[in-house]
Image (cartoon, grey):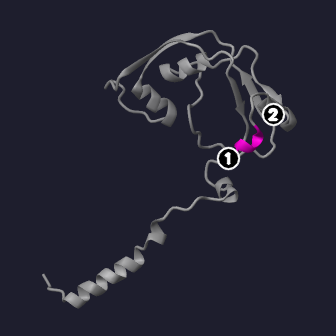
Amino acid sequence: MPCRSTSFKLLAAACSLLLASASHATPKPLSDVEMSAVRGADGSILAGVQGSSSSSQNPFTNGLAAAFSSSTGASLLTPAQFASALEGVGLSPAIFPDYHGQPVAQTVVDARPVTFSFNLSDVLQGTTGLQFNSAASMGTITLKDFDARGTTIWAWHH
């Protein structure tokens, strides 16, 4: 193994410090234009809880779907109606930085209280879509008489 001189080691250390400066490793926030160009802006990547289908076997997503359902469905609000609805609860559209005046779907939850149990692995599957051996228990949670009635859900494309 060759023996390196002290000056060579110092030069190598100085070069590595220059190449690995903090500015290269510091994350920078993306602008709205850059965020719009990110893969998934077309809806191909879903975030949050995946929609529950009637054939879904995930107790977590099925329980949430039952708890946050509405017998009347969503109504479409104009930007002015949305601003008025927010004012009614003491808010303004300015608190949502990604809201740019698009129509808003409003759903008012009227489902009866529900009781459901789920394993923590169901949460991982429902929120990330990861498939894994669910035979290993990660702990079970039971929500008894979970009541979301009166909750208003606003959704818009961004």
- Which corner quadrant holds the N terminus? bottom left
User: In the image, what residue occupies the spot 75% across and 27% down?
Assistant: 106
126 displayed left or right of 20:
right
- Which corner quadrant holds the C terminus? top right
Q: CA distance from mark 2 to mark 1?
A: 24 Å
Tag 1: residue type?
Answer: Asp
Coordinates of residue 45 in the picture (x, y in percent): 59, 43
Residue 95 is inside the magenta segment: yes
Tag 2: residue type?
Answer: Phe
147 or 3, nearer to the observer: 147
* Above or below, comparing residue 10 to residue 93 in the picture: below
Tell me where the magenta segment starts and ends, as one range.
Answer: 92-97
Q: Which residue is labeled 2 in the image?
A: 82
Residue 94 is inside the magenta segment: yes
Query: Mark 2 or mark 1: which comes first in sequence?
Result: 1
Near mark 1 (Cα within 10 A), the count class, few <14, some 14-19 or many ≥20, is few
Coordinates of residue 132 in the picture (x, y in percent): 38, 32
Numbered disc total? 2
User: In the image, what residue occupies the spot 62% across and 17% down?
Assistant: 148
Near mark 2 (Cα within 10 A), the count class, few <14, some 14-19 or many ≥20, is many
Q: Which residue is labeled 1 in the image?
A: 42
5 displayed left or right of 46:
left
Coordinates of residue 4 in the picture (x, y in percent): 18, 86
Is residue 153 in view? yes
The picture quadrant where one finds residue 51 is top right
